[in-house]
Image: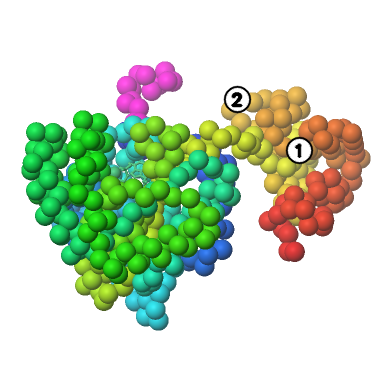
Amino acid sequence: MSEENKAKKIRKILGIRGMNDILPDESPVWELLENTVESVLKSYGYERIRTPIVEETSLFARGLGAVTDIVEKEMYSFEDSLNGDQLTLRPECTAGVVRAVLEHNLTYNGSKRLWYTGPMFRHERPQRGRYRQFHQIGAEAVGFPGPDIDAELILLCQRLWDDLGLDNIRLELNSIGNAEERNRHRADLIAYFERHKDVLDEDAQRRLYSNPLRILDTKNPHMQDMVNAAPKLLDYLDRESLDHFEGVKKILRRNNIPFTINPRLVRGMDYYNRTVFEWISEELGAQGTVCGGGRYDPLFEMFGGKFTPSCGFAMGVERLIELMKAKGGIDSSKKADVFIAHQGEDALLEATVLAEALRNTGLDVILYCASLNSGGSFKAQMKRADESGATFAILIGEDEISSGQASVKALRAENAGNNQTSVPFEKVADYLVDQIVGECGCGENHPSHDHCIH
Ligand code: ATP
Ligand code: MG
């Protein structure tokens, strides 16, 4: 702290607990995930939708169900002091997407495949894999009644894991039937739990009559045996629900997607019916679920729309990032292709022109700019060049200005053969593009895939 600040006793303001800064070093892994997700979703015909982070509180109370974990105790809700509106930071995005689909009549000619990504907010106890601001990537296929779309969403996830090089993410599947089937099961389940009241923990006691299905989801080890022997919802399903479930399984088997049936998998929200699924990794400790999804046929009608059978999933970005980091292999050291060092006013002017010319060809260029903690000597600038991970450095000093030739220095081992050479300023762009061969493998000379037109 500077003397001045000490004197003023300025309090340092920190970030909010459970809400993380994603620092530049982490950006390459986030970008890899974001770019991969975008291309996978596009390859299945999903279109991106962006809904606001704040919605009316009643949207979530109505959409998620009043007795769910999220609505009961995890929402950031507040009153807008300027107009008295009751608002909530979105804890998930399905409700917002459904609202938007209805509001803009997006399903006027049938169905729609949508996806989103962005921050979500839940007031939970922060711990590994569980934050108060976290990010989700989700897909919502709205207006599709059949098991084909449920299977498609699962195949899409599998492709994403494959493209990201993540193995060991396993699929658990269940069907929770429709409301009527669940009601019959619920009556038997409550009677069963009442007979085992001595084993129920406080949470379970509280949910016994409000949300008994959720008791099956308990992580309390003392309740596991009791819960394992409870009546299984799958045994209460009628023909139609069973056929739907069979349809999903058939497509998965035909496509060699392994899964296990978990009869206790129920998912948190009230709006789910029939197919539910979770993708789980054993490498993340207690917070192992990286993606959860399922069918939510009743939701549109709960919002006053017409019957629109739908299915979707949401994945936890931070948990996927943790898996990607553990796997390694992501180079976050390279910040540019070229670093330009310069000395003297004429050199600076020439350097700015050259940097723009190189950027025109698609190269990423860092131009040295004086900073607080670095001197302007070529030596200090070359240290910066090394830190930038650039493949080439260009030096422009008095000599270069008078000869009209830039000094080009290869910084990386693979280009070390021609370590330093002089190149006329107007030829530098061509020279570097020749040196830095197209990364996309199309055979043409261009610095990066961004500029590939093939
Ligand atoms: P959990 O059982 O871990 O609380 P959930 O059922 O509440 O999960 P969903 O609402 O289905 O989770 O959200 C989908 C995914 O979003 C989860 O599988 C998880 O990967 C991620 N997720 C949910 N809550 C958090 C959180 N607080 N922090 C980080 N990721 C989260
Ligand atoms: Mg939760």
Q: Identify the residue at image location x=32%, y=21%.
A: 9
Secondary structure beneath label 2: loop
* Magenta-tinted stretch: 1-15
Give the quadrant of the C terminus: bottom right
* Magenta stretch secondary structure, dominant: loop
Please provide percent x and percent y for residue 148: 44, 67
The quadrant where residue 275 appears: bottom left
Residue at the spot of label 1: 391
Residue 281 quadrant:
top left
Left or right: 403 in relation to 91:
right
Query: Residue 359 versus residue 324: which sits nearer the camera?
Result: 324
The residue type indicated by label 1 comes to: Thr
For residue 223, say whether it is visible.
yes
x and y, in percent, of residue 370 in the image: 64, 33
Q: Tell me the residue at 20%/34% (across/down).
A: 223
**Label 1 residue SS:** loop
Residue at 39% across, 78% down: 110
Q: Where residue 317 sits in the image (x, y, percent)?
A: 44, 45
Side of 166 relative to 196 (left or right) = right
Q: What amino acid type is highlighted by mark number 2? A: Asn
User: Marks 1 and 2: in contact by CB < 8 Å?
Assistant: no
Q: Identify the mark at residue 373; answer none if there is no mark.
A: 2
Magenta run includes residue 400: no
Tell whether 65 sits left or right of 106. left
Q: Nearer the viewer, mark 2 or mark 1?
A: 1
